[in-house]
Amino acid sequence: MKKLLLMAASVFLLSGCGAATLDNGSSGDEKTEDKSASELVVGVSISTLNNPFFVSMQDGIQQLAEENDTQVKFVDAQDDTAKQSNDIDDLIQQNVDVLLINPVDSAAIVPAVEAANNANIPVIAIDRSSDGGTLLTTVASNNEEGGKMAAEFILEQLGENAKVVELEGVPGASATRERGKGFDDFADGKLDVIEKQSANFNRAEGLTVMENILQANSDVQGIFAQNDEMALGAAEAIGSREGVIIVGFDGTEDGLKAIEEGKMSATIAQKPEEMGRLALQAAFDHFEGKDVDTQIDSPLDLVKQ
């Protein structure tokens, strides 16, 4: 009789442990609870609000949130991977329903994505992806295609073997890798890429890096900058030199104005507000039980003089 009671107690304890594992989500097979947009609390981590592109992205998220009475908590990583990880940890502790993350660095963000996964919080990446962890979706432009568009435009304007400089973004960011790949793959054997250096998607660094490049390469004919901020810095470095093609990427207000004024030649224009809205809409769809594509493309346009 004692043996039967012990066996029954063991079965009860084991079944209790199994229930606890399911409740805390470590089993990974829980169904998402349906929630309306007005019931959601959304955490948003943006790489930097010192860049107009990401301010526009934030505006897109905020506008759609206000239209649906959705509570949104924004944090600015200030281009600091450690700060971004800490910010996301804080949002997880605040029990947000979903995280929208625009990573500073696609590799460095992985532990934060995995922490959200362990807490059963869906993660949506915006503009840049994550190298690991599980994402509900990535909302981004086709960066490789955009890089190719830039190379095609420069080739069309300058012809084969033109001497070109490439200003790269933040090392490790998926956008840096993808825009560079699209540009380099098309340029290979067609354009003479004489220099490639990172200016971290930053206007001031774009100016400094381009000034240094020009000291050793006075015969530069074209510049592809992987965002408009670096392109604007490069344009300042070029100054009154004539005949230099400068192509940016993003289609920011300052970039478009520089094209109108003849300071830049073109930009591969993204739609950051639309990107933000698409990301938040994906969260709404997920919590309404709808299927969400693992990749959501945001449109690109070539804007030129």
Image: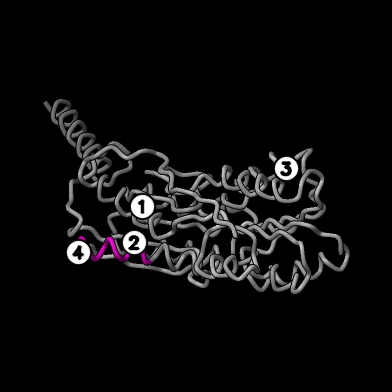
| Mark 1 Cα shell of 10 Å, populated few (<14), some (14-19), many (≥20) | many
Which residue matches tag 1?
Answer: 279
Residue at image mark 3: 187
Residue in the picture at 54% in, 65% down: 256
Q: Residue at x 65, y 48 (%)?
A: 153
Colour scheme of the rendered structure: one colour
Residue 199 left/right relative to 21: right
Circle 2/circle 1 CB separation < 8 Å: yes
Residue beneath disc 4: 69
Q: Is residue 252 above or below residue 236?
A: above
Tell me which residue sits at (18%, 59%) in the image.
38
Looking at the rendered structure, the secondary structure element under dot 1 is helix
The answer to which of 279 and 33 lies nearer the viewer is: 279
Residue bounds of the magenta highlight: 59-68
Q: Disc 2 and disc 1: Cα gap in Å?
A: 8 Å
Residue under pointer 2: 61
Labels 1 & 4 near each other (Cβ < 8 A): no
Question: Quick one: label 2 or label 3, which is nearer the N terminus?
Answer: 2
Three-letter amino acid code of the residue under disc 4: Asp
Are there few (<14), some (14-19), or many (20+) residues within 10 Å of tag 3?
many
> Could you say which quadrant of the image residue 44 lies in?
bottom left
Which quadrant of the rendered structure holds the C terminus?
bottom right
Who comes first in sequence, dot 2 or dot 1? 2
Q: Amino acid at mark 1?
A: Ala
Q: Helix or strand or loop: what does disc 3 sit on?
A: helix
